[in-house]
Image (cartoon, rainbow, N blue to C red):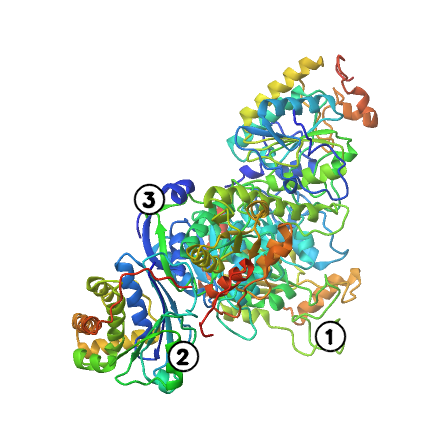
Amino acid sequence: MVEQKVVEPEYLLLEAPRERKFITGSQAFAEAIKRANVDIAIAYPITPQSETMHLVGDLWAQGYVKDYYRAEEEYGAMSAIAGAVRGGARAFSATSGPGLLRGLEAIVSWPGHRIPAVLGVMTRVVNAPLSIQPDNVEIAYLLHSGLIVLHAENQQDVFDFTLAGFPISEKVDVYLPVVVATEGFFVTHAKGYVNLPPEDMKLPPRDPYKAPVPPTDCEIPPARIQRDAPVQKSNFMSYLIHAVWQQEVWSANERARKWIKHYLGGLIEVVNPEAEVFIVASGCAAAQGREAQRYAEMEGLNVGLVKVKSIRPFPKQELREVLKKAKAIIVPEHNIVGWLCKEVKAVVPDGDRVVEGPRVYGGMTLPVELIMDEIYRVLGVKKEKKTLV
Amino acid sequence: MGLEYVKISPGFERYMPRDYVDLVKMGQFGKEVDVMQLGQFKELVEDHPMCAGCYMAYFIRIFYASLPNPEDTIILGTAGCARLALSQAAVPFIYGNYGDTNAVASGLKRALTIRFPDKHKDVVVIAGDGGLMDIGFGMTMHSWFRREKFTTIMVDNEVYGNTGGQESGMSPKGIQLKMAPKGKQFDKINAVELAKTAGCVYVAKLSPTNPKRISKVIRRAILAARHFGPTFIHAYTSCNIEYSIPTREVLADARNREKKDFKFYEWMTDEVREFFEEMEKKQKEEVRS
Amino acid sequence: MAEKKLITPGPAGYIPKPAAFLGVDTPPPGKALLYGEMIDEETAMREAAKAMLTRRNPTIFPGPLVLWGWNSGAIEKAQAVLELAKEIPNCRIIPMPDYRPKYPKIDPEAEINPNHPNLTILHNKIEACIFVGVHCHYANLSLRMIRAGTNCFTIALCAEMGHEDAMVSLRDVHAGDILRFRDVVVEVRRELGIEWEPKLPPENPSLPKEEWTSVSPLDFGEYAYLLMPRRGEIVEETE
Amino acid sequence: MKRYNIRIAGVGGQGVVTSAHILGNAMSAAGKYASLVPFFGSEKRMAPVEAYVRASDQPIYEVGEVVYPNVIMIYHPQVITHGKSYTMPFYTGLKENGMVIINSDTDIIPDEDKKVLEELNARIFYIPATQIAREIAGTELATNMAMIGLFFGITRLVNIEHIEKALIERFLGGTFVASGGTTALDSAIEKKFKKKQELLAKNMEVIKYTIKMAEENNWCEEEEEKVVT
């Protein structure tokens, strides 16, 4: 284990010198955890998450993480994370597809319980039939619970989002769990270039007393504490209590915007802001979109890309602004329901501009060519193609 | 941290509600109380919305009076009757999702061990038969397999009382309850043997008829969990509503069950036994001197 | 002064939108919120002082973080809160000692509970209040319910980042800042021509009465408001 | 921008995945870009295996399997003759002006398919890779080396030092986490060669040979901008 000195998150994320490494997405998760001063990591095996949590286990063996165990199952893992975070620890877990759904009751209760933690989600087909291939429909299940959901395009994003996830999550005015989702295999098991800050630096430890709710550690008043009392109609609870509680969770989600901007440079990234046609995409689909944008530019077509980094909070204002003059908005996705497309349609005026797709699912690759076809179509470009499909 | 967080800021004694002033002045914090002195000190739980004549409420009252270190104790509960009283006590209480107690307690206890390696922070789960032996079964067992150092207390009323009286895994065979209209088809789960097999270092089964003994068992379970590993108490706490036990006969019912399937039973590992013998010997010496 | 007042004393309705949904954000360090708008601390403090000096039944709600002397900072802050209370004519202190719902029901004269704060606000006809030493989550719950259901002017003296749903919200408030606010209160009080000898608020009515030599305005029950100072009025001992 | 989207098709035991990694590592060693996509299937001996590599002198963004390749490498003739492939026919998705490298000493493409490839203006290279491996390295297990050697010989994306660096990384440590099957295969090779160093040297010899083969046959590509759409 390398001796690590504590530095401010601003320094570690935004200023520290970086060195380029060629690593897998799973390794990028682990590199972030190595520098995140994590107290405890708990997980249950599932493909394609497992490799990440093996590496995190190694970090525990080496001393970078203070405690670690393989849980009995996802629900147990996610509940134990809630327990550890209430106890004042900084915690990390990760899961995929069916495992995420199994742990979902616990996970979606984290925001209401005010549990700041980081959860890696390596997307995978949701059964049935069984498959381990990447498909990100599971992200749709995370969008209505108050969680902060970041969607990583590549290995670099995985590292940055995960490391930034901790300070964002622990801000007093946020105090919500941060999900860092990325596509299984496409990102987790493939190598990419990642610029890493030095490994002899780490985030400051979690300060559980700088918080909107007290930790349950018998060190801070009130003693008669129940952070989250069971709420029911009664003469000792207002009918409004659950409503304002939910409002608080979603207000906190709103407040996360400024911190996402602060640590990650914004909720969206725009390539060619003056474009006529935009590709709006998140996660891996943004990588495919980026490639398509490059090809389109090489062919002299005025196409732009909007990468949506944060799905929750959703960048409504930003998208409205950027897409103001767009003739068409192409939304490629790795799922059949088109959750991003629905989100985009809901925030931009004149929703007919939004092209529903291309979409692939069940683990299929999203070829750049499919996006190009949509670009040609909306721009009225005729292409003679001999490619065999 | 000790008692600082249950001390009133200077100057504010006159602004606190009486309830809290009494709790600080005449409560259990920082003191050793004897369960037989109930009524002579301010209890950690007083008003609660449990049914009149509920024996679970009685057990919980004794439980709080028995805590060896209430200012450094955290209680976890789950859906069910017990949490109605647990949520009213002057001890931190965690209520997560249904059946998650032993997983949450695992994470919590580990976090507290990381953060306070030199302190005893007692973690105690009090949940029902449904929470621990049905929906939370896997997490209960695995917390024991992993040798997590906290206490699990099952307040067994043999029924889902809060949801309207459905059969649970701990209901006796043949009993007719909701969701068991033809009577329960299989035996009551043998939780005590499961606990021993799964690695608990201290296991007790009781019907709450003798407060002094309940108190001793609770203290032992908490102290053994501090030093050695998981501990388990299986307590019969009848549901006088669903089992139609007249309020006056609740104690008689408890005694009756004590003669039958809830005979007092206490088991511990040799290591734990030695620990208690040593501790009791020391206590006697202290009393003598 | 704020031009558009987004967050004003209610009642705002059955279930009003939280301020954060209306675009109100917590202020950066050194700034404050007044009616949902970012503003300098001095102006915010003066408006808060004015509310506490002119509205009915001004009350301070100290939370667990000042009520319990768990560290020197808390004790120091508690002292500062008392210093502040002394300077607000006929001010009361109603504590929020913890956050759990309390069965069967709280005594609204003795305490305030974040699960049903309006029991206390409405029972005591409190039209201006200060939250201090309450964890942000619970303060926000209360502030929203108070804005929804009462006409109370809420002031949050927050040790962290502030509260969008309060009419006045100050951030990073510690003992020294409370004393600074006290000075503003004294200054504004003088400007308003209200005369007042500093005096501690009456004790908690739930406590057994041990001291009968003085009577507090509370002892006048529903007529207590008659004792409230008016502009230019000279307030003497209430007996 | 030079950009190669490569699909490698072979059978289990030929080191398809290993060679994809070496290809990627060599690009990395040359300061260029590559991205790999392992095929997530079983890796049983003689079962079809596919791997995908994207190689470029510019950053690569897209991920996933290469659906529309401009390079197809066939490591085993049975991929074509017996249909031992997940992608049928073997040239599915091939783009115009692409290339196909086939391990075979004879022409094995059926006439019907040949017509399609002609229409696509595809360049087809035959190489007796297995034979070369056996002759130079003394083992068929170096077939994959012969294949990537030829690919680099044709494309001239990297030089010999870069390839050697990649090989060292792959065989003498480095961070590559192999699947169980691949590791077992490695140790089988190691036993055969006794020493890892020797293994490396033999592999390098095979690669050098096929690079030279590309040069001698005038198969090398010009330094030109290549646009793939």
Label 3 lies in what chain? A
User: Mark 1 is on which residue type?
Assistant: Ala
Label 1 lies in what chain? B
Q: Residue at x 23, y 67 (%)?
A: D167
The residue that label 3 is drawn on is A17
Label 3 element class:
loop
Quadrant of the image occupied by residue C174? top right
Q: Please determine whether, in this image, residue D13 is positioned above or below residue A120.
A: below
Q: Is residue B83 left or right of residue A315?
A: right
Is disc 2 on the same chain as disc 1? no
**Distance of label 1 from label 3 (alpha carbons):** 67 Å
The residue that label 1 is drawn on is B180
Q: Please determine whether, in this image, residue D61 is positioned above or below residue A256.
A: below
Label 1 element class:
loop
User: Which label belongs to residue D116?
Assistant: 2
Label 2 lies in what chain? D
Q: Quadrant of the C terminus of chain C?
A: top right
- Which is in the foreground here, disc 1 or disc 2? 2
Q: Please determine whether, in this image, residue C41 is positioned above or below residue D81.
A: above
Label 2 element class:
helix
Task: Look at the numbered discs 1 and 3 and tell me whether their residues touch, using CB distance below 8 Å.
Answer: no
